[in-house]
Structure formats: structure tokens, C-alpha cells
Amino acid sequence: MPLTLEQAIGQKLMLSFAGTEPSAEILAVLKRQHVGGITLFRALNVESPAQVRALTETLQRAAAASGQPPLLIAADQEGGQLMALGDGPTPFPGNMALGATGSEDLARRAGTAIGRELSAMGINVNFAPVCDVNINPQNPVVGTRSFGEDPALVARLSAAKIRGMQAAGVAATAKHFPGHGDTLLDSHDGTPVLPHDSARLHGVELPPFVAAVRADVRLIMTAHIALPAFNDGLNLPATLSPKILRGLLRDELGFAGVIVSDAMDMRAIEQGPGLVIDAIAALFAGVDLLILNHTAAEQQAVYAGAVQAARRALLSPEDTLTSAQRVLALKRWLAEHQPFSLEVVGCAEHRALALEVASHAVTLVRDTARQLPLRLPPEARIAAIVPRPADLTPADTSSYITPSLAQALRKYHSPVDEFIMRLNPPEAEVAALQEQLSRYALVVVSTINATAHPGQAALVNALLKRDVPTVAVALRMPYDLLAYPTAPTYVCVYSIQSPAMEALARALFGHIPFAGRLPVSIPSR
């Protein structure tokens, strides 16, 4: 459809709002101007699958009533640590669990199931999968969101998950281009600067994005990371770089789909009055969709500034219209697919698949004590220790989950007591737990990023010094072994979701094999 310049700019914006029903402000915007789409967030918009379906239908009706094309409605439903749509959808393990399976079939099937559930709730764009190659053990933001450290593995599984998701009629998003896997800084907090040149990117970071393009991925999300080698020495975020977006992604990789920015409210991007300038810079660089998780006033300022920039030819009017047509082409592709019924959300078939993924992922790294499989007298008591999960980055919904480790263990051995410790327990809490745990026949102690939380490491090391029979389990990153290197029995499950706890219990008691393989290496192991 032909668009005016104002309508074209509107189609290039992804807005957000607070409320489980459309706010008066967002309805007014939809009545006043074109909008590309809406991003939904767990903390802002989600109560239940049925509520989300009602919300998305109301938003689409409002857009239609004002003569607009259907909205893109997006969420970050990655699986694992980032689940944007609450407790109703199937709790799939994340990408690193799939990486431990090495299975393209499981990645494709998981992508399809996630896509079906999103479709049933009226969400037609998933900001997933993460295609970053996580080769830096100290990466604070990617971690288990990545399939692993091997570019070829990440490429295979990224393409499979994309194909599965898009087979369900939901547009997948490969992120974060050109690769966020080797950063020491979270781009939510600032601009990571990487020294990588073209040869390095083509060898490590880019293969998954090449595979994504070949899999016909519909969107690619930019990273707010700086690569001075591509920008004449400037620490310019890739989101604002024409050489990276137009040169590398469009011209060299041949991507013809929609380029979407990472969230523009992250601190790598200028906020306040500078937000409008950076938004215009991103559009000039080649971004087709801007994710604006800002106040209504700030969203309106970006819209007005971009319209004025196009009117003054600071943004090419022709390029602006062409870019908006890419967004409309995506919307036409989405319109070819019928939504699934709400009955698929959290259905038995999908939950069985989530358990299948978790069961193939659980990894035995070490058992020099020959404790496994567990064979305990019926009266022997097990202590199950779990850190209380927290959101370690803004790209995290772990705080909503209570790991069910003790519950899972009790299915195979009744006398299990549960201990919940703080994420970084202080010395007094560690000492008190030591005294209590010394009386148990076995301790299953789980950790979450223990290398960054020394209290967890202190507890595990204290138990090992007391010769308390201990099985250490990394619930998130495998690097936890670095924090307690003498642990004789060490297992990785890559997830705190219930399927991972069930798979762990089954494997510990010998009901399934430890089938997973480490998708990242543990330094000095």
C-alpha cells in the first residue's frame, strides 16, 4: 500500500505501554498515527495466556479501526532465563540446553512449539533466537541464552530454531548482530567496545547470522556494541553504524528482511534529549524498526523528530518509504498464517517436548567419587540446596521462578529436605547451613553463576572440606566449576525451569543417561 512520509515513519516504530489492557495513551496513538507494532513485557502486560490473547485482539482491532495495517506484536520468548509471557506457556529450556543436546531436530521442534504458543496468544514476532557465540566466560548478558561457543553449532541450531518458529507462522529474529558473545559489559549498562576486525567476525561471530539469512529469517536485531575497526576508530554502536548495517548486513550478507534495533532505552544509546538524535542516526544507519520502550512523550518526540528529519531530507524520503515497505512485506507474510488455538499453550505435547530437551541436555562433567547413579537406603536423608533466583540482567525473568529441585528428587527418594539460600549468602548464613547439612547422607547443592556470587562457592567448598557427600549442580552457566574446582561430582543442566529439575532427578537416580555434552569449555578444567 502507498504510504505518506508520516505513515512510513509510524510503521518504523515499535512502541510499548504499561497495562494488561490497552492504555488510553496507546489507543490514542493508534487512532492518531500509524504504528509498526507493540512489544509486550511480562512485568507490564502479562497475566495469563487468555488475557494476552484478549489484549492482542483489542490492539489489532484498534489499528484496523483507524485504517492501519495489522500490528506487529512482539515479545522476548527465548526459553530458559528469558520468558516474557508468564507461567502459562511451556517452560522450555533455553538455547544452551539445546546446545548441549546438539540436536537440530530438537531445536526445530522447540522453535515450532514456541511459535505455536505465541501465535495462539496473538503474538506474531518473537525476538529470538539469540545467535551470539558465547566464547567469553565473563559475558554478563548472553550466557545460557547462547547455544554455545562453537560457531558451527550455533549456526546449525539457530537455523533449525528459526525454521521451526517460522513454520508456525511467527517471525523469528536473529540477534544480536553482529555478535554479542565476547563482551565484558552488558549493553544495558553501556557500550561494549570490541577490537574485532572483519576476519575475526567472519570466523566467529557471523556464521550463525549467515545461517539465519539462509534460513530466511524475517528479522535481524542489532547489537549496541561498538566495533571501531568498522567505523574509522569511533566507538559507535552497531545500531547506529551504516557500515555495519548497510555495508556488512545488507550488502555483504545479503539480508533483505527487517532490521530491528535492540531496545533504544538501553544505556549504550543516548537517553533524554539525545534519544531523538540517536533514533534518527539508527534510521539513517539502516534500521527498519526502532524498539521504543519509553514514555509516551518520548515515543512521540522520536516520531516527530524522525518525521521532521525525513521532511528535511536528513533521512532520505525514498529510503524511508522503502524501509517501511519492508515492514509491510513482513506484515503481509504474517497475514498468510492463521493463529493457533489457545489450547496449544502449555499443552501436554509441548511439555513432553520440553522434558525431552532437558533430558537430552543434562550433562555429567565429572564423577570421580563414583556417586552416580544414586543408590541410597530408603531412610537416608538428602538435602537439596537452591539459591533464590534473581534477574541477573534486564534480559532475565528468573526471579519469577522457584526451582523445584526438592520436589523432583522426592519422586525417586522420599526423605528430601529443601534449603533455599540467598543468591550470595553471607558468611553467617554459610556457616549455619554447614552445620545443618553435615547431618545428611547426601547434599545436592545447586548454584547459579557461582563465579560471580562467592557466598555460593564458599558453601560448596566448605561442604567439600568436611567430606560431606556432595553432588554439585550448575543450574545456569557451566563455569561454576571454577568456583569450586575440587567438586568430585559435577552436573550441568543450563536451566532452572521445572523440566530441567525433572531431568536432573531422573539422571541422578539412573532412570535416564547423562546425554548432554558441554557446549562451552571450562577454562583450566
Image: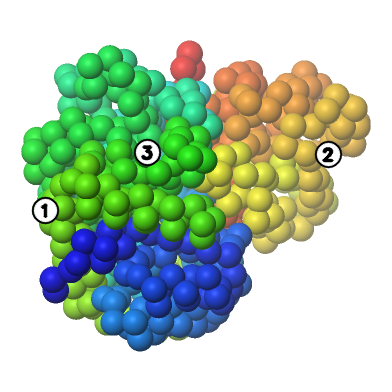
- Residue toward you, 215 or 55: 55
Which amino acid is tagged 2?
Answer: Tyr
Q: Which element carries disc 3, helix, strand or loop? A: helix
Question: Going from the N terminus, do you reach mark 2 or mark 3 first?
Answer: 3
- How is the rendered protein coloured? rainbow
| Label 3 crowd bin: few (<14), some (14–19), many (20+), radius 10 Å | some
Residue 278 disc label? 3
Which amino acid is tagged 1?
Answer: Glu
Left or right: 142 in relation to 376: left
**On the image, numbered disc 1 is attached to which residue?**
318
Instruction: Name the residue at 80% across, 54% down.
Output: 415
Which amino acid is tagged 3?
Answer: Asp
Instruction: Name the residue at 61% across, 24% down.
Output: 451
Q: Which element carries disc 2, helix, strand or loop? A: loop
Residue 183 disc label? none
Measured as percent of width and height from the top left, residue 98 is found at 38, 48
Instruction: Name the residue at 13% across, 56% down.
Output: 322
Disc number lying in front (2 or 3): 3
Measured as percent of width and height from the top left, residue 173 is found at 30, 53
**On the image, numbered disc 2 is attached to which residue?**
440
